[in-house]
């Protein structure tokens, strides 16, 4: 299992914004500079986070990005789900009938346990927890 670069950078972006919570909008170039990520790539990272409703974007002078809600109300699962289009480890765990071996697969319980542990961890931690 690998977490994509977009997800890793997306979490760094969101943590950066959480650290600036309450200070208004943050310019993308400033986050890019602090995080050592190219502004061009960060623009791609931000799009799914905005589409998921995790960000507010203000255009123009004094504009930028800010979290759409307080850091304690955004879980790591929210961030990962937006960037990865879900947090399912395997298709057979979320879509029954995708594998012909499903009815007799003893390994499915192993993967299901891992999925539950990952989901519980991500849902149980917020951006506020990360910056604390």
Image (tube, rainbow, N blue to C red):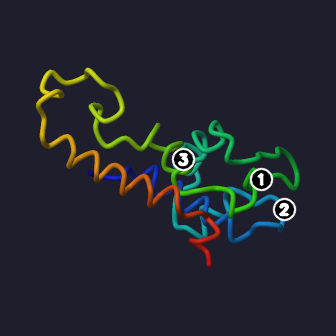
Q: Are marks 2 and 3 in contact (CB under 8 Å)?
A: no
Task: Give the number of marks.
Answer: 3
Secondary element type, mark 2: loop
Secondary element type, mark 3: helix
Q: In this view, does 44 lie above or below 13?
A: above
In percent of the image, x 69 and y 57: which residue is there? 73
- Among the two numbered marks 2 and 3 on one chain, the one whose residue lies closer to the N terminus: 2
Measure the alpha-carbon separation of dots 3 and 1.
15 Å
Q: Characterize the local packing of mark 1: few (<14), some (14-19) or many (20 or more) Cα atoms within 10 angstroms.
A: some
Which dot marks residue 45? 3
Q: Do the residues labelled 2 and 1 touch (CB within 8 Å)?
A: yes
Q: Which of 61 and 121 is in front in this view?
A: 121
Residue picked out by circle 2: 24
63 to the left or right of 34: right
Q: In this view, does 125 lie above or below 7?
A: below
Q: Is residue 99 above or below residue 10?
A: above
Measure the alpha-carbon separation of dots 2 and 1.
9 Å
Which dot marks residue 5? none
In percent of the image, x 68 and y 63: which residue is there? 72
91 to the left or right of 118: left
Residue picked out by circle 1: 64
Of labels 2 and 1, the one closer to you = 2
Q: Characterize the local packing of mark 3: few (<14), some (14-19) or many (20 or more) Cα atoms within 10 angstroms.
A: many
Secondary element type, mark 1: strand
């Amino acid at each position: 299992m690998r977490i994509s670069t977009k997800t890793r950078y997306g979490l760094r972006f969101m943590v950066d914004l959480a650290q600036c919570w309450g200070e208004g909008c943050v310019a993308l170039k400033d986050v890019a500079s602090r995080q050592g990520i190219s502004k061009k790539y960060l623009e791609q990272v931000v799009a799914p986070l905005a589409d998921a409703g995790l960000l507010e974007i203000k255009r123009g002078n004094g504009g930028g990005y800010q979290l759409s809600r307080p850091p304690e109300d955004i879980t790591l699962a929210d961030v990962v789900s937006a960037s990865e289009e879900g947090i399912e480890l395997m298709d057979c765990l979320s879509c029954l009938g995708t594998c012909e071996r499903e009815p007799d697969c003893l390994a499915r319980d192993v993967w299901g346990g891992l999925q539950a542990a990952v989901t519980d961890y991500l849902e149980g931690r917020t951006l506020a927890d990360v910056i604390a």
